[in-house]
Amino acid sequence: MVGYWATLALNIPDFTRFARSQRDQMVGQALGLPLPMGLLSLVAVLVTSATVVIYGEAIWDPVVLTGKMGGISVVIALIALIVATITTNLVANVVSPAYDFSNLAPGKISFRMGGYITAGIGLAMFPWKILETTKGYIFTWLIGYGGLLGPIAGIMMVDYFLVRRTEINHDALYEMHGEYSYRNGWNFNAVFALVVGVLPNLPGFFKAAGFVESVAPIFELLYTYAWFVGLTVSAVAYGALMYRRATLIIPCGS
């Protein structure tokens, strides 16, 4: 579930920027995400466990489970599944990249066109192949990209809360040679921290994806918690590098 919502966790400003106040977005996220997602995970575990007793096998795919049911419940379940899939995908998977594509060329790409581009790329990725197996969907896809997005989240959190102390120079964000330009627009401390955060999860990912037959048990354990491992490692690395940069720059400026 963490991997599932790792994308939305990074692009939540696409939604919270429309909030009337900081309190509104904090309360909205606190009530709207952790509790429902926790309950959803609980229901998923309970239902999948029940299928072992009822059907003699663990059925994790709602579509497959619906196919084994009968009566009007099948129609209701399929309608609910369609509505949930469409609404969730629109919010979690289309809004952010649609904004990104639009921002690349605002004069040529509208938000709607960005959405169409996103949909096209989504189809080109053959998502139905990912959903063929539990291993492919959960262990390779969800945990895999969670291991990539976790380090990004760690870097962003440390930069905003510790390095910037929640104070952002908004004008400088749009300056080619402002305080956020670093070296030709690249903050290599962040790049290095990202790479360091991803590395511990790579062996486990290669094993889950079938690129290698076996890895040390410690790497399989780390990969199970890929998002948390990546976030922690990158956060510590980025914080240390930025602290070192600050200690080197301050004396020179004085």
Image (cartoon, rainbow, N blue to C red):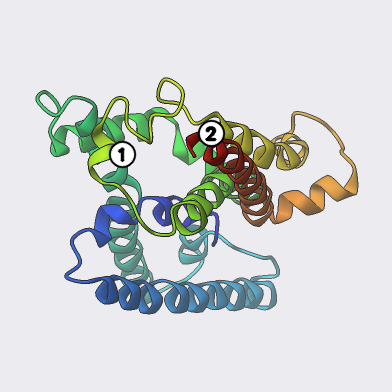
Whether residue 132 is visible to the viewer of this picture, yes or no, is no
- At which x and y percent is residue 194? 60, 37
Categorize mark 2 by other alpha carbons within 10 Å: few (<14), some (14-19), many (20+): few
Among all residues in the image, which is located at the extreme front? 254
Whether residue 84 is visible to the viewer of this picture, yes or no, is yes
- At which x and y percent is residue 94? 29, 45
- At which x and y percent is residue 166? 39, 59
- Mark with earlier residue (2, 1): 1
- The residue under label 1 is 97
Question: What kind of residue is marked 1?
Answer: Pro
Question: What kind of residue is marked 2?
Answer: Cys
Q: Is residue 182 above or below residue 173?
A: above
Residue 156 is marked as none
Residue located at (48% from left, 74% from top):
40
- At which x and y percent is residue 95? 26, 47
Relative depth, front residue between 201 and 122: 201
Secondary structure under the numbered disc 2 in the rendered image: helix
- The residue under label 2 is 252
Q: Is residue 154 above or below residue 182?
A: below
